[in-house]
Image: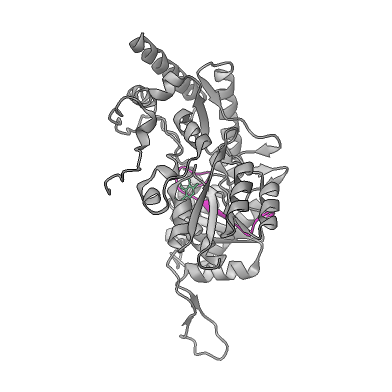
Amino acid sequence: MPPPSSTFSPPCEAVASPCPEEAPLTKTMISYGRQSIGDEDVQALLEAIRAPLLTQGPTIERFEEALAGLVGARYAVAVANGTAALILAVRALDLPPGSAVVTTSNTFIATVNAIILNGLRPVLCDLDPATANLDLAHLAALLEGDPTIKAILPVHFAGHPCPMAEIAALAARHDCLVLEDACHALASSYGGIPVGSCRHSALTVFSFHPVKHITTGEGGAITTNDRGLRDRLARLRNHGIVRDLPSAPPWFYDVVEVGYNFRLTDLQAALGLAQLGRSDHFLQRRRDLVRIYQDLLAGDRDLTLTLARLGTEPSWHLLVARLTDPFLREHKAELFALCATAGVRLQVHYVPIHYHTCFVERFGRPSLPACEDYYRAALSLPIFPELEDGQVAEVVAVVRGAIAELREEQA
Ligand SMILES: Cc1ncc(COP(=O)(O)O)c(C=O)c1O
């Protein structure tokens, strides 16, 4: 890791005391997210591994069709992971050299890396404290002030859908394209519109990492309603290769542009298909868990849960709570250590992008006060389909116990 630059503040900057050592993740520890693997997944993988083609076979297309059907898009292109999907999606927009892309600072670094790796400049927008998604007023100001911004990349953080109609209207006013990072938001919807349908964007990107709504081990996809974009993405995923050229010999292929090997395997697609079959169940279970957390934490004076924005149906990929007491915010690292010792691994989503060395060294450090405030207060509680009702109660009891212990130590 490069040494921190002079302007750099470490991720623990919000913590007055030094960060305690992280407890090792054990099998019995309740973590913030985990895959759910059933017998149907195992069966699908067994069949797939005996199939004639382990990669570039017909299961990919079946998975793509099922995914596109689920989100109401015309096409889906399956790729190796969500990061690859983002890199291809930004590339496929063909933005003019020197363009900037505006996104949130409250995201995983992959969102921003995809912009940088395409030779473009990321501009970071502050967040709306209610949802921790892009703040529309700040977004409008950024677009107004920077004519080099040619695309908007909203992230549906934690599965909470961004206000896409408003974002699309701003994009139209400023001649920008829109692509959505929906790595958290498979199965989310707003006003009955599924995230991924690309109703208000050119492209939407998904991840199938094990903590996500469905998993393929590693995996990702891009959805679109544009046939040209679909074909380009499929070509870029496979080195830029074009086959079946008219009057060419059967072995011939041409490489028409420089691409990648970002392919998903048929094994992964088979797992993905089986997992998609349980998407409704996963969503329902996450909703049930949120309800249990909400009941247990109703009226809690230390923890406030993020609520769904009116008219939205989040996937509840993450369940974020905010610490209301400045004392607890300052001692968040100790709180995490106490919870880990008691078997509960909390997380923070995310360390703001503008705290990372790789961003600061290239682009400086913007002031994004809402994001910084959110970062000090936020913690992610465990939520995944196999979390049991009783474990939710255990998590809440552990967090409350840790808070009480911290206060006692301070008294
Ligand atoms: C918001 C967001 N974007 C992009 C990614 C990258 O996805 P992947 O891990 O599949 O490459 C992630 C993964 O954690 C993410 O959370």
- Asked if residue 65 is positioned above or below residue 377 in the image, the reply reads below
Residue 305 picture quarter: top right
213 in magenta: yes
Which quadrant of the figure has residue 233? bottom right
Residue at position x 54%, y 82% from top?
244
Q: Position of residue 179 (x, y in %)?
A: 59, 56
- Kindly tell me whether residue 388 is visible in this rendering: yes
241 lies above or below 331: below
Specify the segment rendered in magenta. 199-214
Q: Residue at x 48, y 42 (%)?
A: 38
x then y, percent, for residue 295? 59, 20
In the image, residue 270 lies at what x, y percent? 50, 56
Residue drawn at x 37%, y 37% is 11
Majority SS type along the magenta span = loop
Magenta includes 49?
Answer: no
Name the quarter where the C terminus is drawn. Answer: top left
- Taking the image as shown, residue 389 lies to the left or right of residue 25, namely right
Can residue 183 be seen here?
no
Q: Give coordinates of residue 359: x percent, y percent.
A: 40, 50
